[in-house]
Image (cartoon, rainbow, N blue to C red):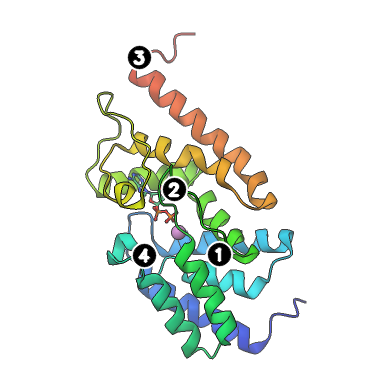
Amino acid sequence: IDTQDSPRTVKVLEAAEAYARAELGGDSGGHDWWHVHRVRNLAVELAREEDADRFLTELAALLHDIGDFKLSGSLTAGEEAARRFCTEQGLSAEDTDHVAGIVADLSYKGAGVPDAPLSLEGRCVRDADRLDAMGAIGIGRAFAYGGLHRRAMWDPEEAPRLHATETEYRSAKGSTIAHFHEKLLLLKGRMSTDAGARRAEHRHGVLVAFVNEFMAEWDGEDGRG
Ligand code: ADP
Ligand code: NI
């Protein structure tokens, strides 16, 4: 039995789950409750393999998309909401700072913007979040996002951009395939735990195979062999 499964931590995690479900339930742009559910499970797996603190990893995973920029339009709403939640739940100042700090520094900010340094727990959550943007689910989420925001699937005439600042990245309106080059295909190289890096290999292969097939079909070069 996991010694961290005390009645108090179970209660906090249940409250965090209820909060995330209520906040994120209906969004279909890739930030729905089921994304959080998958990230939570994956982050807990990574934490086990990496010997990270399970409770803080699981809590940060549950809170990681609350107040997200794309829903709130604010870069600090997520951190503030996480801090408020942890304080209300009676977490220590140290644990509150830790979890709020993870939520604040998790997100991808562009191909040319380096990732923030994070604790081991934060790296487990970030890798789990990024693994959910890769593989078959990552492809599904990217096109769901693109459809919601009325983006082209692909535009052969668009100039490919790798953004050097978060502001440029956030305001980009490129095609969904461009997003693969700006983010999804780079995530394998930006894993920061060994457990995450191992899982990224397969999911990256799925992305590469998809993009190659997409381009072959676009150019009418598929199915000739
Ligand atoms: P993170 O969780 O790293 O902050 P985002 O919030 O930017 O990631 O993205 C959430 C989901 O939406 C991911 O699956 C991501 O690939 C997808 N997404 C974000 N921006 C775009 C875009 N411009 N085109 C297609 N998909 C996108
Ligand atoms: Ni996320």
Q: Disc 3 beta carbon < 8 A from ligand 1?
A: no
Q: Which residue is mark 3?
A: 220
For mark 3, give the secondary structure: loop
Q: Nearer the viewer, residue 178 or 16?
A: 178
Side of 172 where 45 appears, left or right: right
Q: Which residue is mark 4?
A: 68
| Pointer 2 or 4: first along the chain | 4
Instruction: Give the Cα separation between the discs numbered 3 and 4.
Output: 39 Å
User: As shown in the figure, which amino acid type bears the numbered disc 2?
Assistant: Val
Three-letter amino acid code of the residue under disc 3 = Gly
Would the CB of label 4 be found within 8 Å of ligand 1? Answer: yes
Mark 2 and mark 4: Cα distance apart in space:
18 Å
Identify the secondary structure beneath mark 4.
loop
Q: Nearer the viewer, residue 143 or 105?
A: 105
Distance from Cα at disc 3 to Cα at disc 1: 41 Å
**Which residue is rendered at x = 44% and y = 52% of the image?**
108
Q: Amino acid at mark 4?
A: Asp
What residue is disc 2 on? 113
The kind of residue tagged 1 is Arg
The CA span between labels 4 and 1 is: 16 Å
